[in-house]
Image: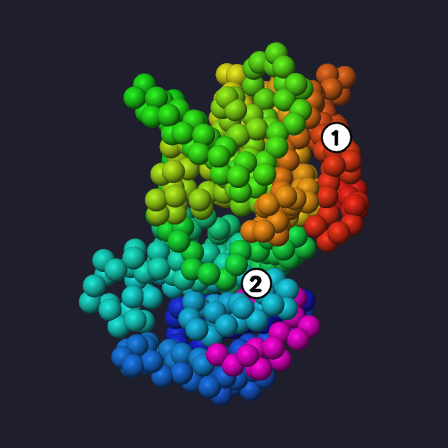
Amino acid sequence: MVIVLVIDTFEGAAKGAPLAAQNLRGALTEAGHEVRVVSCDHTDNMFRVKKRWIPYMSFMAKFQRISYGKPDEAVLRSAFDGADLVHLMLPFALEKRAAAVARSLKIPVIASFAETGYSYVQLAGLGWCPGLSGIACRLLQFNFYFKFEHILCHSRKAYKKLPPRAYVQKLDLIEESDFENVSAAAARLENIYARAIADDNVKYADNSHPAFRKNWAVMPSSIDITNPFKKQRLFFRIWYAWCYYSAVAISAVCSFIGFGLRARGRQNLAGFKGGAITVSNHIHNVDGTFIAVSLAPVRIVFTSIEGNFRLPLVRWINKWVGGVPIPTATHALRGFFDHTVNHLKDGKKVHFYPEGSLSQYCTGLRPFKKGAFHMAVNAGVPVIPIVLVQRPCTGLRRIFRRRPLFSAVICPPVYPDAALSGTRQVDDMRDRTYSVMSRTLEKDQYNPQGETSFEVSNAGA
């Protein structure tokens, strides 16, 4: 494996990120991997960048034997040629540019949180105010770490304190003491890197990697992640119901006027009562409103990524209309699964996007994940497929809209097959749902590129 370590200062400092980087290179090199280093040091066998002078900050960092590297895209591209993974050790300008270059080349990336929050405050020359360490962690998440699926912590303090600071990524810990057994440390690193590479390659494949913009999801979650379906007091239940139906009424007007929304297949739910999971393809930022309008007056609980419940203002809107976050932390998924199953057994309806990510105006159906179908089987409830299909823009709308219009097609409920059990029952339910939705798309879908048909992925069918 070819691994590129990007760090402003690789040698000279006896602790923190430089020492962590040296340990990493030593263990990985001994395990037979090729390790390249991008740094501003003079050491041989490196891809060297120039030093960058930042008023005051560079002066204070010098006391800790740290220098800042100047981003050089030519050097970075040369270092990344043929690389399997890029490992960013610090959250500064050199590493930010390295992340952008790696993403453009579709090379998997992992980031390290090599210092504690207070160490970064000291690097900035603000060590006289230790209370800033928490703010520093949030700013680093806002400005850098949100771009990565995996973060490798080199300090147990950081490993424990990052989750409360809105860090929802997958965290791994490897400390200096772990490198006393070099072979074990290398094996552990190989496992961490393999997971990071696999996760990033999935996102590269479906173009779902987050855009490079500031991450505003830095507020505390508006909903208790451990129990998102917690029953509220009467006043709040009335308030949330009013917010939901008000939002549906406003969305109905906007959807019909702006997107030409048409709802079909409501007869398939005639007389249907009880809990259910609704699923649909995810092809627009506001397609959740299309689902809510199409199923009204039935009230749906919409699931969304956890970050949407950490955004200023938006986090309260998501809560008031009854949305619930899907935890990103692995240890919280079991609780979320159990709470959702109980909610379904109580006769409620919960919406999932089984494709797992948004693909704007996608005309095909992407592979389904199993989670929603696993919950449906455990709760003993059906899945209601809803297919969002696109149709050409006609009439006066062509004056101000070039994009296709939308129709929401409600398909008959898909029930678990009682003759099967375990994973076979889950797979069967997923496959039958996928087949129903695929046939609906093949029949009704309009291709914005001017074709009348399209290829539907066979994955999961």
Q: Residues within 10 Å of mark 2 (few under 14, many from 20)?
A: many
Q: Residues within 10 Å of mark 1 (few under 14, many from 20)?
A: some
Find the magenta span and give its range: 71-87
**Is-magenta flag for residue 78?**
yes
Task: Give the colouring mode of the picture.
Answer: rainbow
Query: Which quadrant would residue 29 be assigned to in this image?
Result: bottom right
Residue 170: mark in rendering? none
Q: Quadrant of residue 66?
A: bottom left
Where is 8 relative to 164, above or below?
A: below
Residue under label 2, please give it.
109
Where disc 2 sits, the SS reads strand
Please indicate whether residue 431 sits to the left or right of residue 371 in the image.
right
Q: CA distance from mark 1 to mark 2?
A: 37 Å
Closer to the chain start, of discs 1 and 2, is: 2
Q: Is residue 184 magenta-colored?
A: no
Q: Nearer the viewer, residue 127 or 98?
A: 98
What amino acid is found at the position of numbered circle 1 in the picture? Val
Residue hosting label 1: 436
Using the rendered view, name the quadrant where residue 423 is placed.
Answer: top right
Residue 220 shows up from this direction: no
Q: Quadrant of the C terminus?
A: top right
Look at the image and tell me whether residue 52 can be seen: yes
User: Residue drawn 50% across and 21% down?
Assistant: 297
The amino acid sitting under disc 2 is Val
Horizontally, residue 412 falls left or right of residue 159, namely right
